[in-house]
Image (cartoon, rainbow, N blue to C red):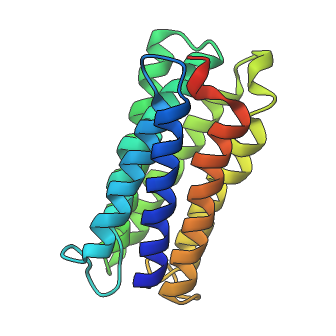
Amino acid sequence: MNLLLSLGSLIFLASSVYFLYYSKKKFNSAFFVSFITLISYLIMLEGSFIVSELLWTRWLGYAVSCSLLIFVIAKRIGLDHFKQVTVIFLNIIVMVTGALSSVNINEFKILFFVIGAVAYCILLFEIFKSKSKKLKPIAPFILYGWSAFPIVFILSNEGLNLISSIISVLLYLILDIITKIVFYHKNDLSTKE
């Protein structure tokens, strides 16, 4: 597991440097999303907060990095200020309940997961009801990339424990690369904000 977390740290260090160097704007959200993800991987690698191989701190990192990513997307597709704030807070609810669900072993695990799932569905609804043409090229990343995270969660030791912690770390790493690095690079969001 440490090898994969080290690899994730190196990948997000490289992407942070890449986005920092190639940014054309004063506010470079791609850099910040990558850099926050790097910090998240380093916290998991350091291990002080790991509980029974549960990497629950990832969800707190996602609360910050994905909120920034969602803000950029909401702004790009033309959501008004109120809707931007709404989707950011929905994301924070999703991620905090993910952290709480991952460390609970009683009936609250399911309750926190359900609350997060409801918030996630509302978040998707708010984004996809936008009629912006700018949503079309990024919609697959949002719908399929983001929706894979709760599936991995359910299968992992944080959920039903159907896959090993090493496999779940690998799957999360792949999803992080797709939804943060590839997404930004392919859609060039960092240079059009």
Residue 107 in percent (x, y) is at 35, 75
Q: Is residue 109 visible?
A: yes
Residue 39, quarter of the rendered image: bottom left
Residue 162's x, y, as percent? 58, 88
- Residue at 42% x, 74% y is 6
* Residue 97 visible (yes or no): no
Q: Quadrant of residue 172?
A: bottom right
Left or right for 49, reference 122: left
Location of residue 87 with respect to 48 vertically, above or below: above
Residue drawn at (67%, 47%) of the image: 182
Q: Quadrant of the C terminus?
A: top right
Indicate whether 177 appears above or below 43.
Answer: above
Measuring 64% from the left and 33% from the top, which residue is drawn there?
A: 125
> Residue 159: image x %, image y %?
48, 77
Up-down: is 130 above or below 5? Answer: above
Which residue does the image show at 57% across and 62% down from the upper left?
150
Lateral position of residue 175 relative to residue 107, left or right: right
